[in-house]
Amino acid sequence: MISPYDISMPVPKAELHLHIEGTLEPELAFALAARNGVELPYADTDALREAYRFQDLQSFLNLYYELMAVLRTERDFEDLADAYLARAAAQGVRHVEIFFDPQAHIARGVGMDTVVEGLWRALGRSRETHGVSTRLIMCFLRDESAGSALATLDAAKPYLDRITGVGLDSAEVGHPPAKFREVYEAAAALGLRRVAHAGEEGPPEYITEALDVLGVERIDHGLRCVEDPALVERLVRERVPLTLCPLSNVRLRTVDVLAGHPLPAMLDAGLMCTVNSDDPAYFGGYAGDNFDAVRDVLGLGAERLRELARNSFLASFLEDEEELRARYLSEVEAYDFG
Ligand SMILES: [Zn+2]
């Protein structure tokens, strides 16, 4: 951890790139395993933390899916979301758009109803309990088939009053956005917002394809756009938000060291960047820790940090609550970075 979560930068911010399954801390994993009679192949929380030393995206994903075995009941998903919301709130998160991966649960016999109802128990009362507004974004696993994604969208139809949009995650290379054209068209027809991971490990062309073929409104990660000046120019011109995750990039070796992260250059280029935590239990920090890291290691000053916080609310799906967005934005402008 860059710093303990309770003293990280509390500038008001929205978190737009957060996988709820990636908030499973070792302590909660063991508690849920005990509650559900699931045997974990780790002696204790220290041994499990040790397993969090990944080499790349795939080695992370292997552990990520293995640990999901402890999530069985509505109460498990409720506890998971509540624990995340408490930590996020302590780091200044005022609004979060949470990703979840129903296919990973359905494949092991945990239904869409359990996942959505369980998450909703925590999300539905989050403004009262945590002071955090929420949206839910259902992600398709891109290493599964397009047919499986369509079946997942179909299974979500009873819950569309609780689901704001769809996303695309998991192993990127070899699974271009165009594979999911049909399901994104169907999601758009249902009135769902659209985002997708692109340009994390995959090439800049995947970013273009996500915009042109899937019609996405935000790009998750998008880091590799810097390899294509024409694409950068387009993203700036069209004000396409990028949900960057600096600590995740270091842990998954997308960048060698944080000091080499292109975020400052991306901001200088005029890109609409936001800073997020991705899978904070696994990647060494929550949203405020990521803000601390880009301040301390990349030397971003108060106005750059304010820009990142402002962007997070501007890029959020708060169109049905513009008054709330305006209040959050005024809190950002009033924040004293000291
Ligand atoms: Zn992600």
Image: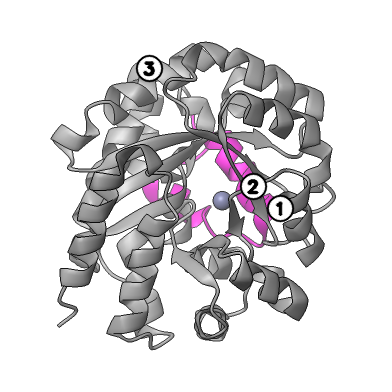
Tag 1: residue type? Answer: Leu
Tag 2: residue type? Answer: Val
Residue 216's disc is 2
Residue 74's disc is 3
The boundaries of the magenta stretch are 39-67
Is there CB contact under 8 Å for labels 3 and 2? no
Q: Is residue 215 above or below residue 136?
A: below
Residue located at (35% from left, 70% from top):
291
Q: Nearer the viewer, residue 65 or 117?
A: 117
**Local secondary structure at mark 2:** loop
Residue 11, given in percent of the width and then of the height, sits at 23, 66
Is there CB contact under 8 Å for labels 2 and 1? yes
What coloring was used for the rendering?
one colour
Disc 3: CA contacts within 10 A as few (<14), some (14-19) or many (>=20): many
Disc 1: CA contacts within 10 A as few (<14), some (14-19) or many (>=20): many
Residue 219, given in percent of the width and then of the height, sits at 61, 56
Residue 55 in magenta stretch = yes
Q: Nearer the viewer, residue 292 or 303?
A: 303
Would you say 79 lies left or right of 101 here? Answer: left
Q: Is residue 222 visible?
A: yes
Q: Give the residue at mark 1.
A: 211
